[in-house]
């Protein structure tokens, strides 16, 4: 197939060499592995210097962008003063390259280099440490794999990478959120069993902790817990609205905004400020376009949003913290436009994210070349997965168990499997499965040809069923991507046998 490069496509590709939002574009003729380094770096947060972690490419910027057909050939070096391991979120590498501590590879030691080589899945993805406190300390970065049409489309690509941030050490923040709960080491699979069977349906209405924001939903005296902690700042591309990134765009241009929620414990609403927009992909996979000006995403999820810009001006694209006034964002601005200061607090709270899964139920899969097929076929195996937990004691469970005393969820390679997540807690859980993509096929008893994803958000007191084809025979992690929930053991394994 022949692809002609449009003027705007050429500009977008060229700008990628210089812009952090577009990321450095890498040559198709790859003669050697790319390099990534896990290291510390210093960013400016509200006028204060902050030492954080990062994944730095050979151009000195964060993250990677790959061309169509380019293999993921990467040499990763650990330049931190502690062990680490990186997970390629949304990708399906061989299990040995998946990036989970001791499953099967050990953490990278200080100074160690490890090589990766696999065929990547196209779309908007990301990479992050699978050590929760390191991810909280910004050890994460975009991983964009472009499709052929991305090179020819008459649009400019912009990445918006979101995070929540505290000036306090991540371990200290985690200890405050969890109330000092035990960290369940992902490698300790033989830990003594704990009797947690009563936790999954526990009513923790009215329970709170310092820094926790309450609100959202009431049901039979129970109150939804939206946020565990008030972070010091909320970042878009490492910056706050006190000094936002301003991206130069063409008048009447079209932008493909790739939004990645890398926050540890925050869901966001993306607000285009009234500018016409269409949601065209989630978690790197196409959906039938959904028009709107506000779209939400939970932790670890991604949105691709096409935006048609007016004649000229400055256009804030804001990320609103769920159920709160805090916000961050970037500015799209045509040449010479006046860029005005935006306060990092909105006048009103943003509201809870997708409590009734109204957004999720609008999404319909569009299968493109290179995407998994997941064509309808009979179900070979079904599992009901109960999500539970409480704020006091701070403990979150899957099927009443924590990691280390868990019972694996099993399947055989090639089977069509249905996983039904039933959330009986009063916090939402973004559930992520390693090594697979899945399709949302049922929400609260309503069947649908839903989005293809790798992370599905399950609000309180709801049921979501996803369909998948069991892949490589191996142990694959299945966990909540809310880092304090993961830290206290909200993880199990999807054990696939040959």
Image (cartoon, rainbow, N blue to C red):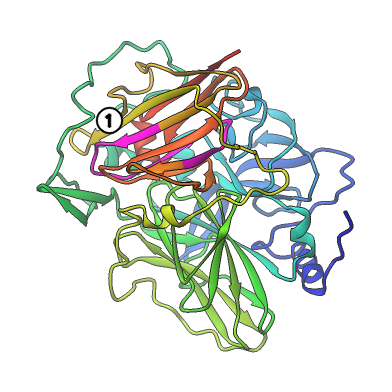
Q: Residue 379 or 190: which is nearer the viewer?
A: 379
Magenta highlight on residue 17 = no
Residue at horizontal 82 percent and vertical 74 percent from the top = 7
State which quadrant residue 484 falls in: top left
Q: Position of residue 112 (x, y in %)?
A: 68, 28
In this orientation, does residue 297 appear?
no
Q: Nearer the viewer, residue 383 or 15?
A: 383
User: On the picture, is 314 further left or further right than 20?
Assistant: left
Which residue is identified by label 1? 181
In the picture as drawn, the residue positioned furthest to the left comes out as 221
Residue 80 located left or right of residue 455: right
Name the spot of residue 20 as percent of width and height, x first.
Answer: 66, 61
Name the residue at 37% across, 24% down: 184
Q: Is residue 486 above or below residue 289?
A: above
Residue in the picture at 37% in, 61% down: 321
Q: Is residue 123 above or below residue 235?
A: above
Q: Secondary structure at mark 1?
A: loop
Question: Against 454, is 184 above or below?
Answer: above
Let me know if residue 96 appears in the view: yes
Residue 6 locus on image (x, y percent): 82, 70
Viewer-nearest residue: 436 or 350: 436
């Amino acid at each position: 197939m022949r692809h002609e490069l449009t003027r705007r496509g050429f500009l977008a590709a060229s700008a990628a060499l210089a812009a952090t939002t577009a990321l450095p574009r890498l040559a198709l003729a790859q003669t050697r592995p790319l390099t990534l380094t896990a290291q510390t770096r210093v960013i400016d947060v509200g006028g204060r210097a902050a030492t954080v972690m990062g994944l730095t490419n050979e151009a000195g910027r964060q993250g990677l962008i790959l061309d169509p057909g380019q293999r993921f050939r990467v040499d990763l070096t650990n330049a931190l003063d502690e062990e680490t391991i990186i997970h390629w979120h949304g990708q399906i590498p061989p299990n040995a390259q998946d990036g989970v501590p001791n499953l099967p590879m050990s953490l990278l030691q200080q100074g160690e280099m490890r090589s990766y080589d696999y065929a990547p899945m196209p779309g908007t993805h990301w990479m992050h440490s699978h050590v929760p406190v390191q991810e909280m300390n910004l050890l994460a970065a975009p991983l964009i794999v472009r499709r052929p049409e991305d090179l020819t489309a008459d649009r400019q690509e912009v990445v918006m990478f979101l995070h929540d941030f505290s000036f306090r050490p991540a371990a200290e923040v985690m200890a405050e959120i969890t109330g000092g709960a035990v960290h369940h080491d992902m490698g300790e699979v033989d830990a003594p069993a704990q009797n947690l069977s009563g936790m999954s349906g526990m009513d923790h209405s009215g329970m709170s902790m310092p820094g926790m924001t309450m609100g959202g939903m009431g049901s039979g005296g129970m109150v939804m817990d939206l946020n565990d902690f008030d972070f010091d700042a909320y970042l878009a591309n490492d910056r706050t609205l006190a000094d936002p990134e301003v991206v130069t765009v063409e008048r009447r241009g079209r932008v493909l905004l790739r939004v990645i929620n890398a926050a540890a414990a925050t869901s966001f609403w993306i607000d285009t400020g009234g500018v016409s927009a269409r949601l065209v992909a989630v978690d790197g996979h196409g959906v039938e376009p959904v028009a709107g000006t506000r779209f939400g995403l939970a932790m670890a999820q991604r949105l691709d949003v096409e935006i048609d810009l007016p004649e000229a001006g400055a256009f804030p694209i804001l990320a609103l913290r769920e159920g709160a006034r805090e916000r961050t964002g970037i500015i799209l601005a045509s040449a010479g436009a006046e860029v005005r200061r935006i306060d990092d607090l909105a006048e009103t709270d943003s509201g809870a994210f997708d409590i009734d899964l109204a957004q999720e139920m609008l999404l319909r899969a569009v299968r493109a070349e290179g995407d998994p097929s997941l064509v309808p076929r009979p179900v070979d195996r079904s599992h009901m997965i109960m999500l539970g937990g409480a704020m006091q004691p701070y403990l979150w469970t899957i099927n009443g168990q924590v990691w280390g005393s868990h019972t694996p969820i099993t399947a055989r390679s090639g089977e069509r499997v249905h996983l039904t997540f039933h959330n009986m807690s009063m916090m939402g859980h973004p559930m992520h499965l390693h090594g697979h993509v899945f399709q949302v096929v049922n929400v609260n008893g309503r069947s649908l040809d839903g989005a293809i994803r790798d992370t599905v958000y399950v609000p309180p007191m709801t049921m979501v069923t996803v369909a998948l084809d069991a892949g490589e025979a191996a142990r694959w992690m299945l966990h909540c991507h809310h880092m304090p929930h993961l830290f206290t053991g909200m993880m199990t394994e999807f054990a696939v046998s040959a």
